[in-house]
Image: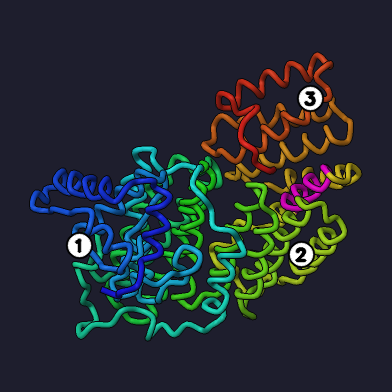
């Protein structure tokens, strides 16, 4: 017992709206359904958990995590409830308890993925839960990200270098792995990444989360440093993919948590550029959701925390995201300056150092695609920017390689939207229909969000017969009610 209030549990308890007696009864009922018939929690015990930081015995923390997850509609882990296994239950931690201690990364990863698989399968974790603000995340993670991790001290150590505390990890029975197994895991990441680029995040998200859960179990063991680093790299790559796929299907709080887990995993493996790129994904999410100020906070940390070893092409990618956030705020001069820096960085990358696997998707086509998106976004504030957006979108489409269907759809939507803003409905209609040809073959909610934004732009041309027909086609392509749906930015 800490004798200090468990403020994290208190905050979640307040959000849930239960009385202490109600929570006690729910714990008993839920535990009995799990086979723990002897459990007898009462109101006074719930009060001690909250007011004095008393840590309940197993299985109560798991029961509470399950109950709060169902009640709040987002994954709530034991860690989120303030029940740290190292006596830190009563301490308020900033920004979702981040950063957590290095030895807890594998534990948090495994617990969160396990709960994600359990509860998202039942549709309980949606887009309605609260996202942490960019400023809160950056405030919590700044000092942690800027310190140099020492792998030898990062993981939990025991007398046996291959031992794992089975009571600590809710996971399958993992075992140490060798280089061949890690190579197979690295190849699986490439397969998942290619699938996501082609078809969107919905169809393979659970497979990625399941694979990440298994890697978390492997990380409970302590392999030789060179293998442990590679395992952390696999974990970071899978966590980014899990986050991006979650974002792609509208599971926004879940996505944000995965991006932060990815940043932790990358840093544990000594890969600061990867940690920065993971945070840049969270920034892109924020712009998409209409929160560009939070995105700029995250990009500041992503750029400064990536380290000097970050390749020019990676830095160029980071600048394009910053430019998109600036465009969303109507800061045309700043956006143009930032995109100019991105172009210079991209051109300065001579390719003499092979890019990491996670950067191979960002090529010249993506550079133009992001520029098109930034200028198309700015055109909402400066209509003259629409012409430049069209030029970049056409170049992106010319350069696109096969297997990038979702990006191609985005390019067509950017191009059509820019044409509408430029008062060219005939060309806009042509490109919009090209986007509609394949949009039904993806499982990406983000394509629907941007299609809905394009639908908004068609309103001023509704008197044109072809545009009226296009509007009806868009309505049929969008999920029911989405043409007038959620308030998301492009």
Using the image, determine if residue 62 lies above or below residue 416.
below
Identify the element where label 1 is drawn.
Answer: loop
Q: Residue at x 51, y 50 (%)?
A: 130
Q: Is residue 69 left or right of residue 485?
A: left
Q: Is residue 174 visible?
A: yes
Pick the quarter of the image with the C terminus. top right
Write down the residue under mark 1: 173
- Give the distance between the C-alpha atoms of the residues marked 1 and 2, in whole angstroms: 46 Å
Identify the element where label 3 is drawn.
Answer: helix
- The verdict on residue 373 being magenta is yes
- Give the distance between the C-alpha atoms of the residues marked 2 and 3, in whole angstroms: 34 Å
Cβ atoms under marks 2 and 3 closer than 8 Å: no
Sooner in the amino-acid sequence: mark 2 or mark 3: 2
Kindly identify which numbered label has been placed on residue 342: 2
Q: Residue at x 84, y 27 (%)?
A: 425
Q: Residues within 10 Å of mark 2 (few under 14, many from 20)?
A: many
Write down the residue under mark 3: 459
């Amino acid at each position: 017992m800490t004798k200090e209030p468990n403020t994290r549990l208190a905050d979640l308890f307040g959000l849930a709206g239960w009385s202490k007696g109600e929570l006690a009864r729910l714990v008993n009922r839920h535990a009995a359904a799990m086979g723990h018939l002897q459990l007898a929690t009462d109101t006074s015990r719930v009060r001690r958990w909250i007011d004095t930081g008393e840590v309940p015995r197993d299985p109560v923390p798991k029961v509470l995590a399950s109950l709060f997850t169902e009640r709040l509609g987002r994954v709530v882990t034991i860690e989120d409830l303030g029940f740290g296994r190292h006596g830190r239950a009563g301490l308020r931690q900033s920004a979702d308890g981040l950063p957590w201690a290095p030895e807890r990364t594998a534990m948090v990863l495994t617990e969160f993925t396990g709960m994600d698989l359990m509860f998202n399968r039942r549709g309980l974790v949606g887009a309605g839960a609260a996202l942490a603000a960019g400023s809160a995340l950056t405030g919590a993670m700044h000092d942690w990200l800027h310190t140099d991790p020492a792998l030898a001290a990062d993981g939990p150590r025991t007398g046996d270098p291959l031992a794992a505390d089975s009571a600590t990890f809710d996971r399958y029975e993992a075992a140490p792995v060798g280089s061949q197994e890690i190579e197979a895991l690295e190849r699986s990441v490439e397969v998942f990444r290619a699938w996501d680029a082609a078809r969107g995040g919905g169809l393979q998200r659970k497979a990625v989360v399941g694979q990440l859960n298994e890697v978390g179990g492997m990380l409970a063991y302590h392999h030789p440093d060179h293998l442990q680093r590679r395992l952390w790299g696999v974990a970071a790559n899978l966590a980014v993919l899990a986050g991006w796929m979650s974002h792609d299907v509208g599971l926004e709080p879940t996505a944000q948590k995965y991006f932060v887990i990815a940043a932790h995993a990358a840093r544990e493996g000594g890969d600061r550029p990867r940690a920065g790129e993971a945070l840049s994904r969270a920034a892109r999410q924020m712009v998409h959701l209409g929160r560009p100020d939070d995105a700029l906070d995250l990009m500041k940390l992503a750029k400064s925390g990536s380290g000097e070893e970050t390749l020019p092409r990676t830095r160029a990618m980071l600048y394009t995201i910053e430019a998109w956030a600036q465009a969303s705020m109507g800061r045309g001069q700043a956006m143009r300056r930032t995109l100019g820096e991105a172009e210079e960085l991209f051109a300065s990358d001579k390719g003499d150092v092979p890019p990491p696997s996670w950067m191979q998707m960002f090529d010249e086509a993506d550079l133009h695609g992001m520029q098109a998106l930034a200028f198309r976004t700015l055109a909402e504030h400066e209509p003259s920017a629409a012409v430049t957006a069209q030029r970049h979108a056409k170049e992106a489409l010319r350069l696109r390689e096969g297997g990038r269907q979702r990006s191609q759809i985005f390019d067509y939507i950017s191009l059509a939207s820019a044409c509408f803003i430029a008062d060219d409905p005939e060309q806009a209609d042509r490109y919009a229909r090209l986007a509609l040809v394949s949009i039904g073959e993806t499982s990406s909610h983000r394509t629907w969000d941007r299609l809905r934004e394009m639908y908004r732009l068609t309103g001023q041309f509704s008197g044109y017969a072809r545009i009226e027909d296009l509007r009806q086609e868009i309505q049929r392509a969008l999920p029911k009610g989405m043409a007038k749906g959620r308030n998301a930015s492009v």
